[in-house]
Image: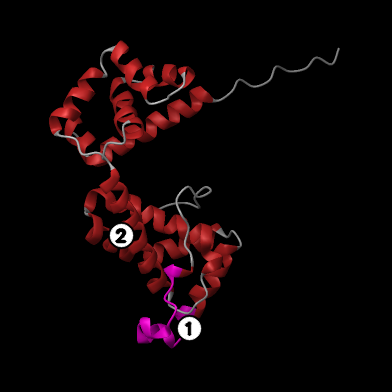
Amino acid sequence: MPAPPPEPQARGVGAHDEPADSRDQPAHSRDQPAHSRDEAALVEAVAEGDAGAFATLVERHAGRVLAVCRRELGADDAEDAAQEVFARLWRHAATFQGRASLATWLHRVAINCCRDAQRKAARRPRRTSTDVAELAESLADPAALEDVLAGRGIDAGLRAHIEALPRPQREVVVLVDVCDLPLAEVAARQGVAVGTVKSRLHRAHARLAAAWEPDPPAPTSHE
């Protein structure tokens, strides 16, 4: 589960993520036991940037959040959705007002994250396995790869770095990041587990970040 995440790119948690009426809450959440008061203090600490408090809440709630995401999305996409749930907790802890238990609040956020993922998947153009195979095979041809990247608006500098990646990493970057294919389809194409695709993508991103790092300024002479 995540360390404190960076600034948000997806929509944040708003008032709609917490039930407005106490009747929508389980009875135990209205009693405000000591555990709930403790969690309220931890959420307040997270809102002030306390990474330790954040880690404690992730440890307590990760299993339940992941179970919700698996039920809504299936195993392949559940982990990414669960990561987004805790990213929203980190970014928007200050919106938690304690009208519901934190477990209820996170459950609602998890459902919203899953619905966002489902809407994104519905907008993604459907491709057949033949389409994916043909696209992947074409990436072995430098000219075809150049055409795919240029056609997607990737600038020349970044294209050069992508083209320099080892083929498995280059393939996942183009298929997942550039062509927006689902991880499961890319994993099937490469004959590996989804986790392996994620690992290749992570290593590719690290290589690209390092390659894209600007050269340090030359030291100034004090002579």
Task: Provide the residue designation for mark 2.
Answer: 66
Q: Is residue 122 magenta?
A: no
* Residue at the farthest right position: 223
Mark 1 surroundings within 10 Å by alpha-carbon count, few (fewer than 14), some (14 through 19), many (20 or more): few
Q: Secondary structure at mark 2?
A: helix
Q: Is residue 26 magenta?
A: yes
- The reply to whether discs 2 and 1 touch (Cβ–Cβ < 8 Å) is no
Q: Secondary structure at mark 1?
A: helix
Q: Nearer the viewer, residue 117 or 86?
A: 117
Q: For the point 22% across and 61% down, which residue is it?
A: 71
Which numbered marker is on residue 34?
1
In this rendering, position of residue 103 left or right of residue 223: left
Estimate the spatial distance between the alpha carbons at disc 2 and disc 1, rounded to whole Å: 25 Å
Q: For the point 20% across and 20% down, which residue is it?
A: 137
Q: Which residues are magenta?
A: 16-36
Q: Position of residue 69 (x, y in %)?
A: 29, 59
Which callout, 2 or 1, points to the residue nearer the camera?
Answer: 2
